[in-house]
Structure formats: C-alpha cells, structure tokens
Image (cartoon, rainbow, N blue to C red):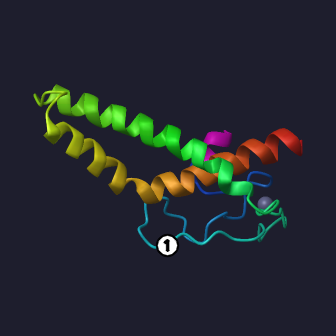
C-alpha cells in the first residue's frame, strides 16, 4: 500500500498531500519539493543535508536500470562487450534521471518518516 502512495507522490504520513509540486514522476520540468505537506503539515525537510542519503537510493535505482537495459540489449542481439550496449545503458539512465531523482527522495522520505516517527 505504501508503494502505491509512493508512486503517486503522496505524503508518507497522511497519503493526501503531494511531496513534489508536479504529480508526474517522469516530468522533465525541474522538481520542486514542498517544505511541508499541504494537508497534515508533515515537515518534508527534516534537517539540513537530509536528502544526501537519497543518493544511495538513486545509485541503486540507476544500477538496476542499467542492468535491465543491458539485459534488454543482449536480448535483441547486441553483444555485452559492444559499445552500443554501453550507449544504450547510459541513454536509458539519462532518460530516467528525473524519475530517479524524485523516486530516490520519495523512498528516502518514506523510509525515515515511517520508521522513525511511527
Ligand atoms: Zn500529509
């Protein structure tokens, strides 16, 4: 259930307000995160540097996406050692960068809001 709310860009506490101004996680517009939930006033910026840890989540997401792109490339007949395969993997991660940025922050926020404050 929390995964559905996370994908819908909803507040981890009340599941009503939005964390980012835009609801589309794949939007290429610059992501603007709200300071607090417009519905329950949950603080989204817990402390300075809180979202530095989201880089670890982003790294994991990018690694998973590169592995999936590599498997896809191999399945359509491109050798794993070919530079075309590397290009496809890098292009795939670059296209998904806005999604990774928002999703990593949302996962990080969900982890620490639900584990510490419940
Ligand atoms: Zn809320």
Q: Quadrant of residue 73?
A: top left
Q: Quadrant of ligand 1?
A: bottom right
Closer to the camera in the image, 32 or 2: 32
Q: Is residue 39 magenta?
A: no
Local SS, label 1: loop
Closer to the camera in the image, 7 or 106: 106
In percent of width and height, residue 28 lies at 41, 68
Quadrant where the N terminus is found in the figure: top right
Closer to the camera in the image, 91 or 102: 91
Task: Give the residue drawn at x 36%, y 48%.
Answer: 93
Horizontal side of 76 relative to 103 (left or right) equals: left
In percent of width and height, residue 54 lies at 63, 49
Horizontal side of 31 relative to 10 (left or right) equals: left
Q: Is residue 62 above or below residue 36?
A: above
Task: Give the residue drawn at x 23%, y 32%.
Answer: 72
Q: Is residue 11 visible?
A: no
Q: Quadrant of residue 42?
A: bottom right
Q: Is residue 33 above or below residue 89?
A: below
Quadrant where the C terminus is found in the figure: top right
Q: Is residue 94 above or below residue 114?
A: below
Closer to the camera in the image, 2 or 55: 55
Q: Which residues are magenta?
A: 1-6
In percent of width and height, residue 103 lies at 55, 51
In percent of width and height, residue 75 lies at 18, 26
Q: Which residue, given by chain and number where applicable, does mark 1 sit on?
A: 30
Q: Is residue 81 visible?
A: yes
Task: Give the residue drawn at x 51%, y 42%.
Answer: 59
Q: Is residue 47 above or below residue 111?
A: below
Horizontal side of 83 relative to 47 (left or right) equals: left
């Amino acid at each position: 259930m929390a995964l559905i709310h996370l994908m819908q860009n909803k507040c981890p506490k009340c599941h009503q307000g939005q964390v980012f101004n835009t609801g589309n996680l794949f939007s290429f517009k610059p992501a603007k995160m709200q300071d607090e939930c417009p519905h329950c006033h949950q603080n989204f910026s817990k402390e300075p540097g809180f979202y530095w840890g989201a880089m670890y989540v982003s790294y994991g997401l990018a690694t998973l996406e590169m592995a999936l792109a590599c498997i896809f490339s191999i399945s359509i007949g491109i050798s794993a050692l070919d530079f075309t395969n590397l290009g496809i993997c890098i292009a795939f991660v670059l296209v998904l960068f806005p999604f990774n940025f928002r999703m990593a922050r949302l996962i990080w926020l969900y982890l620490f809001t639900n584990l510490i404050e419940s």
